[in-house]
């Protein structure tokens, strides 16, 4: 319980740091003080404040919270002193005293190096078509150093001054998306300024680079699932067009706010019956008319699911996506039916409220656990 409360205020603090800097950047941009880079406002400083370290150094987080409380108190005291002439000097005298006693946070714990794109956000949700395009670009430009699985064992790796990092783990989630974009387009250097990874700005458009980032994350998700049996970081479902029996075409993301079950066609397995607790969409490439329900039928939808699940073919598998669009569960290839152990993207926290009515079946138990553990903070150390 204590940990949950701590997580809540820490998350508020980290979110606050991020939004305050973003607001500052937007204001500077609106005033024409900073320009654009890669299509979004450019962060003008070589540093930014990051909450990620606070997750490791809880003491610093407490200090920061105390310092912010002091700043709020000082502002209030100034406002009161303005209006209250007689008490003005007593009030103002408390400020330096308070300033001395406040445990100021260590600037080096909050400051991290920034790039001009640190606050850039991806142009949209990851799409299956983008993931597949990114996969092809990866095979063309990156595989010789980073290896097919992203673990950094490509044929050229051993000849490099710096060994490529393991992209198949949580690294991509630790970085700001905008920093990844910047590193792809402008390359990386060591502390002496010597290039360690080449720049791709002359070969990749920004859209290509974003597609690569989505593809690398999808690949890392599949590798994590293979290695540990879990999606250790929150993974978004790649969007894809869906055709419905009523003749309409709509994107998978249009069901945001509802739980989604993706049923990938397998050999001879009939699709499961509809269930009122979730929206069922079949995944089945082909162009025969859709007789009932809704079907995602682009080859990219199929391929993106294979990558996300770390398998050659997702045939016969089912996936459950939560109301926020995160992939949360994949059916067991060896066991029929669902259980709450199939939640593959989860925290170890106990469910928030112990429900008095036990769910009637495995799927109900899974949904209850998924709803009780929504995906929360994504950067840094907290997991969903
Ligand atoms: C010539 C070899 C080489 C090629 C080609 C290459 N990389 Fe790298 N990459 C590296 C090395 C070495 C590092 C580590 C550099 C460092 O930490 O200074 C790296 C680091 C990275 C990182 C981590 C960045 C970070 O923020 O820490 C990512 C992501 C990445 N590469 C993606 C790619 C992608 C995508 C491509 C293809 C478009 C690519 N790389 C092509 C060698 C390469």
Image (cartoon, helix red, strand yellow):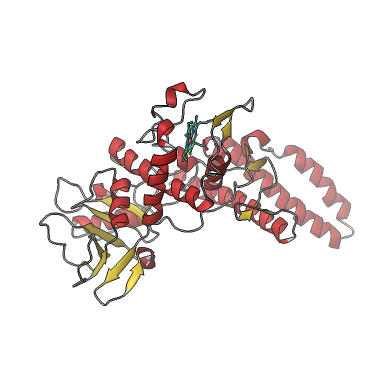
* Observer able to see residue 129: yes
Task: Pick the residue in front: 12 or 36.
Answer: 36
Q: Please give the name of the residue rendered at 46% of the width and 31% of the height, measured from the top-left corner.
A: 165
Residue extending farthest left = 268
Residue extending farthest bottom = 246
Residue 151 placement, left or right of 279: right
Residue 36 placement, left or right of 196: right
Residue 101 placement, left or right of 382: right
Task: Pick the residue in front: 326 or 59.
Answer: 326
Q: Quadrant of residue 22?
A: bottom right
Question: In the rendering, at what x and y percent does residue 52 appear?
Answer: 54, 41
Residue 71 placement, left or right of 261: right
**Is 8 above or below relative to 293?**
above
Question: In the rendering, at what x and y percent does residue 127 appear?
Answer: 40, 57
> What is the count of numbered marks?
0
**Is 56 above or below relative to 207?**
above
**Is 259 above or below relative to 347?**
below
Question: In the rendering, at what x and y percent does residue 284 appear?
Answer: 22, 60
Q: Quadrant of residue 202?
A: top right
Task: Pick the residue in front: 31 or 62.
Answer: 31
Q: Please give the name of the residue rendered at 69% of the width and 38% of the height, measured from the top-left corner.
A: 104
Task: Pick the residue in front: 296 or 225.
Answer: 296
Question: In the rendering, at what x and y percent does residue 195 appear?
Answer: 58, 29
* Observer able to see residue 348: no
């Amino acid at each position: 319980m204590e940990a949950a409360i701590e997580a809540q205020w820490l998350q508020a603090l980290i979110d606050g740091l991020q939004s305050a800097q973003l607001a500052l950047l937007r204001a500077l941009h609106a005033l024409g003080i900073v320009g654009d880079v890669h299509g979004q406002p450019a962060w003008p400083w070589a540093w930014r404040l990051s909450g990620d370290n606070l997750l490791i150094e809880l003491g610093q987080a407490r200090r920061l919270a105390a310092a912010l409380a002091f700043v709020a108190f000082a502002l209030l005291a100034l406002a009161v002193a303005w209006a209250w002439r007689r008490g003005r000097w007593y009030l103002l005298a408390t400020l330096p005293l308070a300033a001395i006693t406040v445990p100021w946070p260590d600037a080096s714990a909050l400051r991290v190096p920034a790039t001009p794109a640190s606050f850039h956000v991806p142009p949209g949700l990851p799409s299956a078509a983008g993931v597949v395009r990114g996969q092809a670009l990866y095979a063309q430009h990156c595989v010789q150093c980073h290896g097919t699985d992203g673990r950094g064992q490509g044929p050229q790796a051993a000849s490099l001054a710096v060994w490529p990092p393991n992209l198949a783990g949580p690294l991509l989630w630790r970085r700001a998306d905008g920093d990844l974009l910047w590193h792809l387009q402008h390359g990386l250097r060591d502390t002496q300024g010597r290039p360690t990874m080449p720049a791709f700005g002359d070969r990749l458009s920004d859209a290509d680079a974003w597609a690569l980032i989505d593809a690398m994350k999808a690949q890392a998700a599949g590798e994590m699932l293979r290695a540990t049996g879990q999606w250790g970081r929150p993974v978004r479902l790649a969007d894809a067009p869906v055709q419905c029996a009523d003749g309409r075409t709509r994107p998978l993301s249009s069901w945001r706010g509802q739980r989604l079950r993706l049923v990938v066609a397998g050999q001879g397995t009939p699709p499961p019956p509809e269930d009122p607790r979730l929206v069922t969409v079949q995944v089945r490439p082909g162009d025969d008319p859709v007789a009932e329900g809704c079907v995602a039928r682009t080859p990219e939808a199929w391929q993106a699911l294979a990558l996300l699940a770390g398998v050659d073919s997702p045939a016969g598998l089912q996936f459950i996506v939560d109301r926020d669009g995160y992939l949360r569960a994949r059916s067991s290839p060896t066991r029929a039916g669902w259980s709450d152990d199939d939640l593959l993207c989860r925290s170890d926290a106990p469910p928030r409220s112990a429900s008095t009515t036990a769910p009637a079946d495995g799927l109900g138990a899974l949904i209850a656990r998924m709803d009780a553990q929504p995906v929360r903070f994504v950067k840094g150390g907290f997991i969903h």
